[in-house]
Amino acid sequence: MKIFPWNKDFETMPIGSRDKMKRLEEQVIQIKAAKAVAARYNQLLLAVKTKYPDKSRHDTALMYIKQVEAFSEDDGDRELQPTTSTHIGE
């Protein structure tokens, strides 16, 4: 993936500069990937409208996921019942 506009002159650069450019380009790719993961994680956290008292959105989301996963492993005859929780705005 070519990120920087000066890559057209890459082959004429001194080898040390080329190595630095390659490392910089790899770092930019890693940063972009990390930002994409952070954006998806934030989307998941912001989907938590109601959280458990004294728990973070992360912990609440994890509990919700575990509840649904446990429910799906059961026979499926009973309904998923929410436990006591607190709305985020409260």
Image (spheres, grey):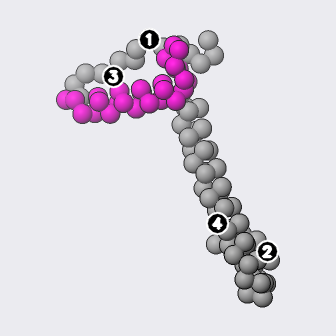
Q: What residue type is labelled 1?
A: Thr
Q: Residue at x 40, y 32 (%)?
A: 65
Work out whether 10 lies above or below 90.
Answer: below
> Sequence order check: which comes first, mark 4 or mark 1?
4
Looking at marks 2 and 4 on the same chain, the residue that comes earlier in the sequence is marked by: 2
Check disc 4 and give the amino acid type.
Answer: Glu
The residue that mark 1 highlights is 84
Three-letter amino acid code at disc 2? Pro
Residue at 62% of width from left, 58% of height from top?
Answer: 30
* Disc 2: which residue: 5
Q: Distance between the residues labelled 2 and 1?
A: 55 Å
Mark nearer the viewer, 3 or 4: 4
For the residues marked 3 and 4, what is the alpha-carbon distance in whole angstroms? 45 Å
**Residues packed near mark 3 inside 10 Å, few (<14), some (14 to 19) or many (20 plus):** few
Assess whether mark 4 and mark 3 are in contact (beta carbons under 8 angstroms): no
**Which region is colored magenta?**
49-75
Disc number for residue 80: 3
Residue 87 at what x, y percent from top left?
56, 16
